[in-house]
Amino acid sequence: MFDWGLIHSKSFDIPVICVGNITIGGTGKTPLVELLVREYSTSYNVAVLSRGYGRITKGVYREVQVEDSYLNVGDEPLQIKRKFPNVKVVVCADRVFAIKRIQAESPEIDMIIMDDGYQHRHVNPFFSIIAIDFTRPVEHDHLVPYGQLRDTTSTLRRANCFVVTKCPADMKPIQMRVFRKVLVELPKQDVFFTRVKADSSRAVFADVEGSVAFGSEVIAMSGIGNSDAFKEGLAERYKVVDAIDFDDHHPYRKNDLTIIEETLKRHPRAVIMTTEKDAVKLSGSTAIPQHIRERLFYEPITLLFYESDEGYHSSPSKRQIIPGFNETAYKELIEMLNVELKNRNNERHIKGLRGHS
């Protein structure tokens, strides 16, 4: 309907950056959103807009507060708010309504980062970044329910760039070229390759001190869309002796404590290592007894970008990739965005001059 012009998308007078995907489950959008918030919140008044998946306040507009329960706002929006308490974070199913309300109530906001809005065609984003899970190539997938695609691969033409997440540390140039060949259809598009970097472990509860030494026995526990990469990452640093896998956005309940306690009893020297998203949910629970609280840890994560030897201005098909990680490719992504922001501002300035002539 949108492609045929029967329904029109709404553009806004402030830049809306969309971070999305075309598959169900965890593709690693949240670290990308956090990266953009960290980058632009120093030069823009940024707001983050999310649907707030899994919350009991279904669909309604709500501004996220640091003290909120994830049940009311969603786990990922709450994680972002607690990391960036001075940034406005809003959950709402109707993105057009939400952006209009944000502008009306907070006119100082001059950039919106929209989490998981690629399928929400009612909003015409200024820039779209699509997260692609390395472990689940889209060209071999099918639409749900026969696969995990929530959209056809033809819709990727609307994207400005792609960030391939969960890449192996020893990723080969030929693997990168395959992704580029599949994803890039237009000259404006580019592909970036990343994997997560885990920071030092932290206790889930503030009243518990200490961290977990590398090589220690851990139980991997998560409620995310694709836990394989999480467990493989832990295995690089710890001895993973067991795993507890819940569904994505799992709402922790009292009966989960039985599973957790029984697993800890089987491994008396182990601690539980969970994800940052799960830590947000667990940290608000008053039902977890102290002897379990003392054995719950998580690792905050950031993204590492693979380096290329040329900037994004060169043809992606001709770019030679140098294996290894540093900040060069990340700076290329930000430069790509900054160029588009500058072009957008110039176009708006020209239109303004014409309007006054």
Image (cartoon, rainbow, N blue to C red):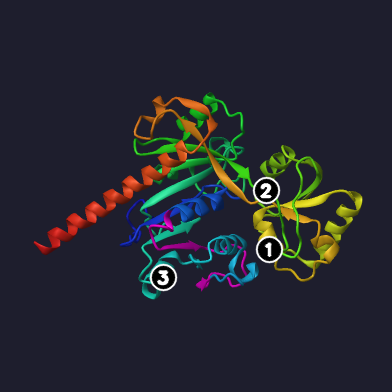
* Kind of residue at disc 2: Ser
Q: CA distance from mark 2 to mark 1?
A: 20 Å
Identify which residue, 270 or 166, lies in the foreground: 270
For label 1, the SS is helix
Q: Work out whether 242 lies above or below 282.
A: above
Q: Which residue is mark 3?
A: 102
Quadrant of image for the C terminus: bottom left
Q: Which residue is mark 2?
A: 200
Whether residue 118 appears in this view of the structure is no
Bounds of the magenta span?
40-63
* Kind of residue at disc 1: Lys
User: In the displayed image of the protein, which residue is found farthest to the bottom?
Assistant: 105
Q: CA distance from mark 3 to mark 2?
A: 36 Å
Q: In the image, 213: left or right of 345?
A: right
Q: Position of residue 35 (x, y in %)?
A: 50, 51
The residue drawn where x is 26% and y is 54% is 345
Q: Along the polypeptide, which appears first: circle 2 or circle 1?
A: 2
Q: Along the polypeptide, which appears first: circle 1 or circle 3?
A: 3
Q: In the image, 87: left or right of 346?
A: right
Give the overall secondary structure of the magenta segment.
Answer: loop
Mark 2 vs mark 1, foreground winner is 2
Q: Work out whether 33 lies above or below 174.
A: below
Q: Which residue is mark 1?
A: 281
User: Which image quadrant is residue 7 in?
Assistant: bottom left
Q: Are marks 3 and 2 in contact (CB under 8 Å)?
A: no
Q: CA distance from mark 1 to mark 3?
A: 26 Å
Mark 1 neighbour density, 10 Å: few (under 14) some (14–19) many (20 or more):
many
The residue drawn where x is 78% and y is 40% is 215
